[in-house]
């Protein structure tokens, strides 16, 4: 994976990560968390 694509995935994960918690501070059990985890796993496999 090229650096530009990797940086884009990291940025997307960081933005999505802001939505892991609800306004009440509760853990947001949604597709957002699943997607963040998938991005993290993909980056690990790519050596990130």
Image: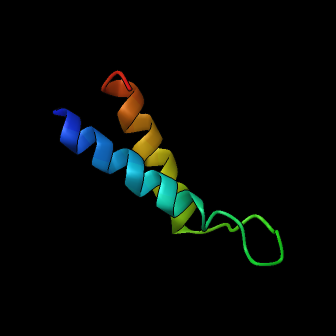
- Percent position (x, y) of residue 27? 75, 64
| Residue found 50% across the figure and 62% down from its top | 16
- In the figure, 19 relative to 8: above or below? below
Instruction: Specify whether 29 is left or right of 45.
Output: right
Farthest residue toward the left? 2
Farthest residue toward the bottom? 23
- In the figure, 39 relative to 18: above or below? above
| Residue found 44% across the figure and 36% down from its top | 41
Question: Looking at the rendering, which quadrant does residue 44 occupy?
Answer: top left
| Residue found 28% across the figure and 39% down from its top | 6
- Percent position (x, y) of residue 4? 20, 42
- In the figure, 40 relative to 24: above or below? above
Identify the colour scheme used: rainbow
- Percent position (x, y) of residue 21? 71, 66
Count of numbered circles on the image? 0
Quadrant location, the N terminus: top left
Quadrant location, the C terminus: top left
Front residue of this view, candidates 16 and 28: 16
| Residue found 83% across the figure and 77% down from its top | 24
Instruction: Specify whether 15 is left or right of 21.
Output: left
């Amino acid at each position: 994976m090229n650096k530009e694509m990797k940086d884009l995935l990291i940025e997307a994960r960081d933005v999505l990560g802001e939505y892991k918690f609800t306004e009440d501070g509760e853990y947001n059990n949604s597709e957002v968390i699943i997607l963040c985890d998938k991005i993290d796993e993909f980056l690990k496999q790519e050596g990130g």
